[in-house]
Amino acid sequence: MIWDHGKETMARGDIVRLQLERLRTTLGRVAIHVPFYRNRFKDLGFDPSTFESIDTLRELPFTTKQDLRDNYPYGMFAVPLREVVRIHSSSGTTGMATVVGYTRRDVEVWSNLVARILTSAGVGAEDVIQIAFGYGLFTGGFGLHYGAEKLGASVIPISAGNTRRQIQIMQDFKTTALVCTPSYALKMADVMMDVGVNPSGLSLKYGLFGAEPWSEKMREEISDRLGIIATDNYGLSEVMGPGVAGECQECNGLHVNEDHFLFEILNPDTLEPVKPGDVGELVITTLTKEAFPVIRYRTRDLTRQILEPCPCGRTFARIQRIMGRSDDMLIIKGVNVFPTQIESVLFDIEGTQPHYNLIVERENNEDKVTVLVEVVESIFFDQMKKQRTMVDTIKKRLASELGVGVNVKLVEERSLERYNGKSSRVIDKREL
Ligand code: DLL
């Protein structure tokens, strides 16, 4: 099923034409209504009414999180507050939060885009969707909620936390689709085991997970343990929230809603486009947002475009799952490492649990990483020799996969923190 067949299967030429038309309108609107953009355009001598080709966008400057902070709270809004019907805020995990607004039409578009993502993940009007994202300033709860209602599904707005109750409700209300962060899904699987609930006795069929980076191995783990099709969906508050991109049931990359967002993938150092298919930073321009349009917003998220057409029939370009944020990248002896790469290796080693922390310290101007990984009881309480063999195995596998060595420490099952929302597995002890 495709939610918006007319749009989601458009021919490339039509997509580009629509993008150009919408881009021209957006540039014109921000030039009139947002002093930040008006001044920038003036300094550049750029007149949006002469905008003829999408390539020209590259001549415009980026919008960064700092720009949004400098204009806190409402300086980047393109409409008066009278027209704003909703306000959300980014999670502020990397500093001061930013504030975003939506007009009634923005909320309508948002709901439709999330309905697309739910549909592409296999969910329909007959489904019972348990939304275990936080409701509040975070866009996850309300974003998915409005999309699920638009779809006509039965929505359980349970929000995050109180895991035993989540499981009880899942049983009683016969939830068919679970929506939360991947780390929370894993926690639910653990708690199900604790309380003796067998996931195969539940009605769950689908899991839509997002809001944080996760690996392919983690997808396998969640799918196997909960017996569901687990799909990835991506978004960010500054651009809209969830609904920017989502996977179809091919589970091989996320379709970007290209009729509403123009994406570029750039080399984060040179800020030039990468070669098609190469990894780079995602930069997004909104094409239809009324209250909070952004031009060339630097997401800091790293991904690559998947160039092959998707068998599902959707023509919107696909991006690979987000590897991580450029700010989360560790540089160990000059080698770039993402936490999700470490996760993939750990998930593959028998005896480890899919729970880990990375402690990052700085020694002689280099990052030093210690991986704390939970191991099953039988290993943790076993003789030293077995433990040492396990540490060696993990170290070797990590070294061969990452191309650089890290320290490894085994910890007892269930000793590391579990997360209801976005996980924070990196414990940064560097004084930068
Ligand atoms: O996390 C929006 C969202 C809610 C997306 C629910 C999907 C589902 P923020 O709190 O502003 O918004 O955080 C945005 O989270 O720049 C990425 O670094 C990360 N992120 C979001 N989705 C994914 C994903 C929401 N599927 C930031 N994979 C983004 C990896 C993700 N990282």
Image: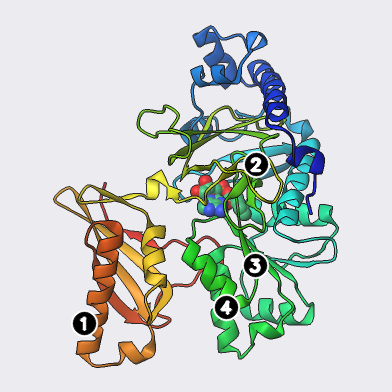
For numbered disc 1, what is the local secondary structure? helix
Residue labelled with disc 4: 225
Question: Can you see residue 136?
Answer: no
**Is residue 317 left or right of 355 when viewed as pictured?**
right
**Inter-mark Cα distance, 2 to 1:** 48 Å
Residue behind label 1 places its C-beta within 8 angstroms of ligand 1:
no
Viewer-proximal residue among 359 and 283: 283
For marks 1 and 3, give the one nearer the viewer: 3
Circle 2 Cα neighbour tier, 10 Å, few/some/many (<14 / 14–19 / ≥20) = many
**Disc 2 to disc 4: CB gap under 8 Å:** no
Amino acid residing under circle 4: Arg
Vertically, is 112 above or below 358? Answer: above
Amino acid residing under circle 3: Ile
Residue at 26% across, 53% down: 430
Query: Residue 388: which numbered mark, if any?
Result: 1
Circle 4 Cα neighbour tier, 10 Å, few/some/many (<14 / 14–19 / ≥20) = some
Residue labelled with disc 2: 240
**Inter-mark Cα distance, 4 to 1:** 29 Å
Q: Position of residue 115 (x, y in %)?
A: 76, 51
Residue labelled with disc 3: 229
Q: Position of residue 77 (x, y in %)?
A: 65, 29
